[in-house]
Image (cartoon, coloured by chain):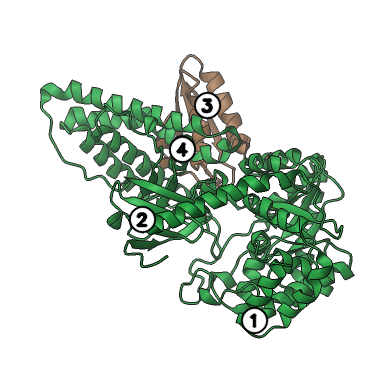
Chain colours: A brown, B green
Amino acid sequence: MKEKKVIISNKLGLHARAAAKIVTLTNKFQSIIEIVNNGKKADAKSIMKILMLAAPKGTEVTITASGKDEIAAIKSLEKLIEAKFDEES
Amino acid sequence: MKNPSSIILKGLPVSKGIAIGACHVIEHGNNIVEERYISKSSIKKEVKRLEITFNETLDELNIIRAKISPSIRKNIGLFLDTHILLVSDKTFLDSIKSRIIDNLCSSEWAIHSEYLNIKDSFENIEDLYIKQRIDDVSHVVKMLLKNLITKKTNMNVVSKSFNNVIVVTDDLSPADVIIAHESKGLGLISEYGGRSSHSSILTRSLEIPSIVGVKNGLDIIKNNDYLILDGNEGLIFINPEKDLIKHYQDLKKSSLKKKRLLSNVLTKKNISLDKEKLEIMANLELPQELKIIKEKNIDGIGLFRTEYLYTDRNDFPTENEQFIAYKQIVKKMKNNPVIFRTLDIGADKEVPDNIKTGSIARNPALGLRGIRYSLSDQSVFINQIKAILRASNYGTVKIMLPMITNFMEISDAKKLINVAKDKLKKEKRKFSDNVSVGIMVEIPSCAVLADRFAKNVDFFSIGTNDLVQYTLAIDRVDDEVNYLYDPINSAVLNLIKIVIDAGSKNKIPVSLCGEMAGDPNYTRLLLGLGLKSFSMHPSAIPEIKNIMLNSDIKKLKRISRDIINCDSIAEKNKLLDKINNI
């Protein structure tokens, strides 16, 4: 299993569009991918669960992936979050 | 119209035109869910039923999405994307399934109770943006329940056709409008909605006669009622008499005929009989409308409303998202100018929840709107300006500031425009050095001192809708006072004249982009007052241009002045009649 801490730094946090981008990305991987916020775990392939995490700007979350493509999965997800979901050009 | 014994309903006309025909009522409303236990032996069957419904709903959403034309897919499609992801969400489906398997609930009951469960969790969320996403979940749940309950023989929305009918619904969704357009529906009526919701804008750009805000419409209109929908006045006649149907059929025919006759003026040069060069521009609300104006041979976009990028969502459009939209328009217009009005939200325009224009403003028309909002939320404004400036690389772009009341607002806005420029330079983004900055003249304080304002800006555009409202202190949408709304009130005309004269004295262009510009009754009057540039809804262009080509402006000046100086309304109407028949 791979694990990484990242900070949600886009303006609105994990809102609908950001969650949509995460789900679209994670579903390309076979690994089980999760986002953990303050002990709350969410399946990163479920838009509903990510929305319910309700992580606003500034939240530190842990992303985990386990499976064949876990390294690539973690890297891509980290990149997406760090690029602020390509929102702020 | 003698003695109409039929029932008449009134609503907000959002897209012009007349529709006559039978109606088709669709109710999105709330489904009542029956709490039914299933037998253990039918678990498998019930789970299958649920899965089929999920698949059908997903297909339905995908088909609706594919029907959206590419130019608007990006904006209109976004709300569908969230819905599509929700329906494809495996954990969502699995939790519902386990309710069937563990608790022996029927699919309907399982979906509904899972929905209530999700709703509970959302209620504990503090973040308002995310909290509101429960609306998306609720919309999806409604679709699922409807598909569960409706018989599988008719493929629901996918094959839904509004051919030759007027659709009456409780809440018009953009999907409804798209289906009506594709299946050649006659018109649309909705109980809810406002002028600037995406659905309403779509009805205009697709030219489907539509009325929204028809209170209790579904209680009164029954399926297959025969209706007349007058999208010019916002009137609906239910099962009208023959005379009235005939009247409207004639009206419809003559407007179609006029439209055909006028189409040949579009290719002609826009010069008056006495050889004055005139200018016609279009007011646009959506990039998709570029298609309609293509063959209209216009001189530019006199007003590009940017609100559509901000409404029907709970977050702000990013700079890039705006840039892509703006660039598309600028490129299409080649070297003809595109005048971008910066965000003008508030008053009669619906305000998304992320934009705080004062929650319970007592009088929103006098509240935090237009440039006032932009100056109060500077990062939003700077982002928009950056996007507009970047688009200037691809053609001729102008920036127009709405709701200007004093000189300070202009200098403050210009400072922020410079901040945007500096940021772009730092980011090594290109933009044109010649982006002019002008203002909407729509508040009397600005019109009265137009000569001084002219020295601070590059152009004027007169917004008559608000100018009339603010000069006469009446709210146009208030039924009690809207009889006072009068664009040819002498005080209003006087202000218009002051602005036109100030423009020519200071050598800055003046155009008029309010509804008055597209009203054929006032074209000659405005020409007589010295106006040379008109910006209007694309559908009004042929008729207005025809009047321009057949006007001798020299002969209109005196009588225009007489109209301003006339105290009697009856006398004024006579003069207006006279000027229109010279």
Q: Position of residue B207 (x, y in %)?
A: 54, 46
Residue in the picture at 32% in, 41% down: B142
Is residue A77 or residue A60 the one in the foreground?
Answer: A77
Q: Position of residue B170 (x, y in %)?
A: 35, 51
Residue in the picture at 64% in, 39% down: B291
Which label lies toward us, 2 or 4?
2
Q: Earlier in the sequence, mark 4 or mark 1?
A: 4
Give the chain letter at badge 1: B
Distance between the alpha carbons at the discs numbered 4 and 1: 45 Å
User: Which quadrant is home to the N terminus of chain B?
Assistant: bottom left
Contact, mark 4 vs mark 3 (Cβ under 8 Å): no
Q: Position of residue B76 (x, y in %)?
A: 53, 40
Which label lies toward us, 3 or 2?
2
Does B445 appear above or below B339? below
Q: Earlier in the sequence, mark 2 or mark 1?
A: 2
Give the chain letter at badge 4: B
Which label lies toward us, 4 or 1?
1
Do marks 2 and 1 share a chain? yes
- Per the image, label 1 sits on a secondary structure element best described as helix
Q: Label 3: which residue?
A: A25
Distance between the alpha carbons at the discs numbered 4 and 3: 38 Å
Residue B2 appears in which quarter of the rendering? bottom left
**Left or right of B570: which side holds B141?**
left
Contact, mark 4 vs mark 1 (Cβ under 8 Å): no
Q: Label 4: which residue?
A: B184
Give the chain letter at badge 3: A
Q: Label 1: which residue?
A: B571
